Image: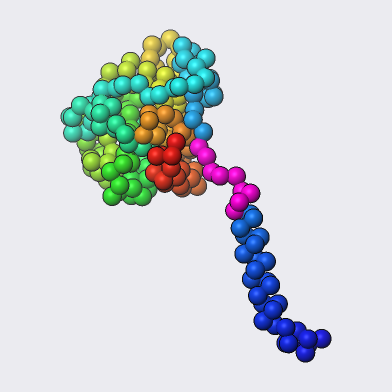
């Protein structure tokens, strides 16, 4: 038996390699291609969506906006036009999940530091407290890079509108207080066409890694969509 194997070892070796390659090719051919969903208000937990848009099932995009960033600059949709970006909601005095979320967002900033097609947009849910100077101090402390990441403040009504009507990511606060907001751990992925493509738990490193992978997928496939 050993002599037989030695005699045909080249054949067996070739057969094994061929079998592995064939199985790999079949697996890759049959494996479903990766896709990212396009989220509309009707697809999301109603608690995070304003009641006036919960019925919308298609063609949802991020509305135009105008806020002020950590440098006192007015930030509008133009700064994000044609770009992939990650949006979230926070406040500078938050001592629970915000520090974790900010540290994890730093990882996203680092991953795309030299890619101008990817940006970050963080909205304060307490804009009356988070003034430009407060945001600037926070940005410097956390290592925010101005060209990549805007921390914005502005009219609370408008931030509330964006949070619940566009990004579909923030819970309503006290019903007795108009435009009260309770931010969540959500990082929201927006594509170059202003569509919501994913929600990620910003407190979990594995979720942030998935976010980074999905951004890379969008970068590679945005022209095909």
Q: Is residue 31 magenta?
A: yes
Residue 65 to residue 197: above or below: above
Q: Is residue 99 visible?
A: no
Residue 205 to residue 74: above or below: below
Looking at the rendering, in which quadrant would you find the N terminus? Answer: bottom right
Q: Is residue 53 left or right of residue 89?
A: right
Looking at the rendering, in which quadrant would you find the C terminus? Answer: top left
Q: Which residues are magenta?
A: 28-36
Q: Say which residue appears at 53% left-offset and 25% top-offset.
A: 44
- Of 80 and 181, nearer the camera is 80
Q: Say which residue appears at 78% left-offset and 86% top-offset.
A: 4
Occupied quadrant, residue 62: top left
List x then y, in percent, for residue 64.
31, 21
Q: Say which residue appears at 73% left-offset and 87% top-offset.
A: 7
Colour scheme used in the picture? Answer: rainbow
- Of 75 and 95, nearer the camera is 75
List x then y, in percent, for residue 25.
61, 58
List x then y, in percent, for residue 202.
44, 39
Count up the numbered dots.
0
Q: Is residue 60 left or right of residue 83?
A: right
List x then y, in percent, for residue 182.
43, 24
- Of 1 and 75, nearer the camera is 1
Q: Main secondary structure of the magenta part?
A: loop
Q: Is residue 45 magenta?
A: no
Residue 111 to residue 190: above or below: below
């Amino acid at each position: 038996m050993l002599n037989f194997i030695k005699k045909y070892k080249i054949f067996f070796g070739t057969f094994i390699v061929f079998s592995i390659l064939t199985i790999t090719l079949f697996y890759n051919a049959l494996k479903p291609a990766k896709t990212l969903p396009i989220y509309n208000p009707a697809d999301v937990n109603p608690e995070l969506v304003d009641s006036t848009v919960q019925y919308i099932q298609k063609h949802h995009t991020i509305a135009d906006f105008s806020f002020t960033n950590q440098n006192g600059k007015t930030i509008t949709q133009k700064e994000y036009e044609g770009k992939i970006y990650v949006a979230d909601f926070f406040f500078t005095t938050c001592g629970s999940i915000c520090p974790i979320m900010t540290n994890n967002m730093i990882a996203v900033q680092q991953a795309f530091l030299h890619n101008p097609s990817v940006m970050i947009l963080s909205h304060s849910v307490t804009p009356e407290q988070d003034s430009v100077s407060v945001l600037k101090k926070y940005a410097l402390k956390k290592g925010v890079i101005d060209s990549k990441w805007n921390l914005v403040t502005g009219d609370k009504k408008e931030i509330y509108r964006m949070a619940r009507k566009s990004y579909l990511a923030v819970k309503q606060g006290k019903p007795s207080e108009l435009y009260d907001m309770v931010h969540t751990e959500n990082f929201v992925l927006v594509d170059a066409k202003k569509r919501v493509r994913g929600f990620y738990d910003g407190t979990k490193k594995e979720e942030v890694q998935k976010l980074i992978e999905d951004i890379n997928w969008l970068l590679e496939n945005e022209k095909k969509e």
